[in-house]
Image: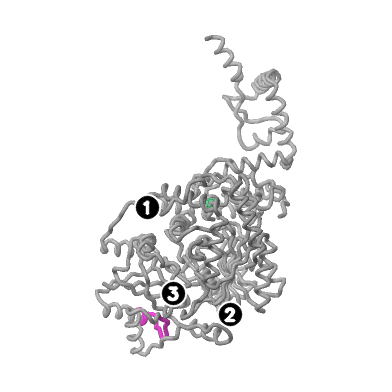
Amino acid sequence: MSQAPAFDRRAAAAAADAKLGEALRFTTGRLQAGRAAALAELPDADALRDHARRVRAHTLRHLGRYLDQFAVQVEALGGTVHWATTAADAVAVVVEIATRRAARLVVKSKSMLSEEIELNHALEQAGIRVVETDLGEFIVQLARDRPSHIITPIVHWTREDVAVLFRQRLGAAEQDVADIPAMTAFARRLLRREFLAADIGVSGVNFGVASTGSIVTVTNEGNGRLTTTTPPLHVALMGIERIVPTVDDLEVMLRLLARSATGQKLSVYTNIVTGPRRDGEVDGPRELHVVLVDNGRSTLLAGELAEILYCIRCGACLNICPVYQRVGGHTYDSVYPGPLGSVLTPGLHGLAAAPDLPQASTLCGACRDVCPVRIDIPRMLVALRTSSVQQGLGPGWIRLGVKAHAWLASRPRAYRAALRAVGVASAPLARQGWMARLPWPLSGWTAHRDFPAPARRPFSALWAERRRAR
Amino acid sequence: MNTTERERMRAALDRASAAGFLPEAAAPHPGRFVQAADTVAPAVLIERFAHELESLAGHVHRAPDVEAAVAIVKRIADDHGTRSFLAWRDDDLVREASSSLERDGLVQKPQNVALAGPERVSSLAEIGTCALGITGADFGLADTGSVVLGCGPGRGRLASLLPPVHVVMIRLERIVASLAHALAADPTLASRGSNLVVITGPSRTADIEFTLSRGVHGPREIHVVVVG
Ligand code: SF4
């Protein structure tokens, strides 16, 4: 994962982009309001979230057992399960399935996992045409762009941008791009042809149910249903943590997912696939392959970031995050942006691959408060910052600063002297307890906000005085 | 299944879930989520169902009996100038409507998609031209305005997916409070066929400028005809 240009440079550029700022404010604001209203009208929302969290925790504690149960069920129904340790393994499985059947066209419904393992590229290398069918992902693919939000991938696009793209790349006529419904209808016609002609449908998996071997995909457009219905072969890419033990557990997750994501009570299509087409049934793929992908998850599960695997990918933490709202998804340069991604990406690929992400947070805790399964993201961001200092990854001045502080803090006499010095030196700069301008390098802080003035007399001095007075 | 790969992954997982920091994982599975009991009268359920579905721009029609329901379906077909349709074969309500439409000269297309080869492609193309799909439903869900459709012999997935207009015929007593209630009433619901779909309103997207448009890949119109 490339980190150039660095996070702060990308962030500065994004924050200066007024059009992007407006789009982000509007969309994240609407999504947040929708979520709040949907949860408010849900009876027992808090108890439900506690329950869901316990289900996720229990499942991950016994993940191997539940995956086994799931795999046995899928195979009993005539499906095939593939276990893939790495991204390369997973890609190889899919390419092998496709080439063995001489597939020429693959339709895909939205799958972040497929972006994580960079599947499209590998299929195209093998001479297979790949078509994304979620409207946003279709546009991203056509423009060779990247999604910037896990629920609304093209929040950074305007309708004019889409119109130009459709005209230039697809030869759309003026009336095809007259307004948003026209563009949607245009894409529908085009993609419908691909659905009916496709050799393979590749889908992601929102949840896999261990007790039944069911695969659940949730979409509003219906592309998830088409992808898993019209082609003769369905490949489902599933991160190993997507398991829920029972159908009742699935129902609990569904009750929270759409409400937290968009404020809908349920997404339009909750599509549950249990094995390939059966004898006597009239449609559906006759072949089903489920690829269980680890790609760093078991390493993550073994450590202090394991809790991030409770995530059900609702996107609520992105919408509420003051950093995401200002800088947008591309700034994170990661398949998973926002607070979720700032833990997941370094967790999956190592801190060295994303050293900036744990810093991209104010630690305000808003993400933890909106998370339907109450994941303590700030705790893990702090843990990552600690490791980053320990591994010598952070910026040099932070490491130096921490060292200097450690030296000072373990020498009471020097510490008190330093405090007194700061108190005296800062006095001329302070106005009513605040300092508006500081010399370099602290001017970086005061360029944007005031800094609280140090107390004239340090706490330790006051404390000592009180003790003496008693 | 590749056994060695599976065993490698399983071993890594067992080590990992024992070692990792998983808050609240020590407790046993919390069981079913129990909610305050709600026995609700059918009249309240249908009202809630209609309110929810209509707020998503779905259409709800009430019919006192099968005859009236069939008349409503005919009117919807008329309104859309329908000449051919796709319908479930094993549902008694839908069968009544289908025969009536056929008597009026509309063509019912076969649901069956061939398993492979050029026949598969041509049967899909044939079905793809239908303007109307008619299905039954296992349940209606009052709290979300959803319909629950399990597939099976005679009950294809495509009738609720390919045509731009989808009509659902359902008896009043099949409307229950929520998905949890449906699953409690019918525990094998989710896995009895190869597909179960919970449909909540017409197909939609808000990908471009967060502006809603309907009928992206699935039907742009959904009508639920409630009998009884
Ligand atoms: S971390 Fe929580 S809020 Fe963020 S996407 Fe995952 S489930 Fe949603």
**Which chain is disc 2 placed on?**
A
| Whether labels 3 and 1 share one chain | yes
Q: What residue type is labelled 3?
A: Cys
Q: What residue did someone put label 3 on?
A: B151
Amino acid at pointer 1: Val
Taking A191 as reference, is B136 left or right? left
SS of the residue under disc 1 = loop
Q: Give the number of the disc on residue B34.
A: 1
Let me know if residue B207 is in the magenta part: no
Q: Whole-Å distance between the Cαs marked 1 and 2?
A: 46 Å
Marked residue nearer the N-terminal end (3 or 1): 1
Q: Is residue B82 magenta?
A: yes
Query: Which residue is nearer to you in this view: A158 or B197?
Result: B197
Q: Can residue B217 be seen in this view?
A: yes
Q: Is mark 2 on a helix, strand or loop?
A: helix
Judging from the image, what secondary structure is the residue with disc 3 in? loop
Q: How crowded is mark 1: few (under 14 residues within 10 Å), some or many (20 or more)?
A: few
Q: Residue furthest top?
A: A469
Residue receiving disc 2: A197
* x then y, percent, for residue A418: 69, 21
Q: Nearer the viewer, residue A325 or A167?
A: A325
Q: Which chain carries label 3?
A: B
Question: How many other residues sit within 10 Å of disc 2, few (<14), some (14-19) or many (≥20)?
Answer: many
Q: Mark 1 lies on which chain?
A: B
| Residue in the image at 32% along x and 82% along y | B96
Is residue B54 visible in the rendered image? The answer is: no
Query: How far across and how far down the image is residue A79, in percent?
Result: 56, 71
Q: In the image, which residues are magenta?
A: B76-87
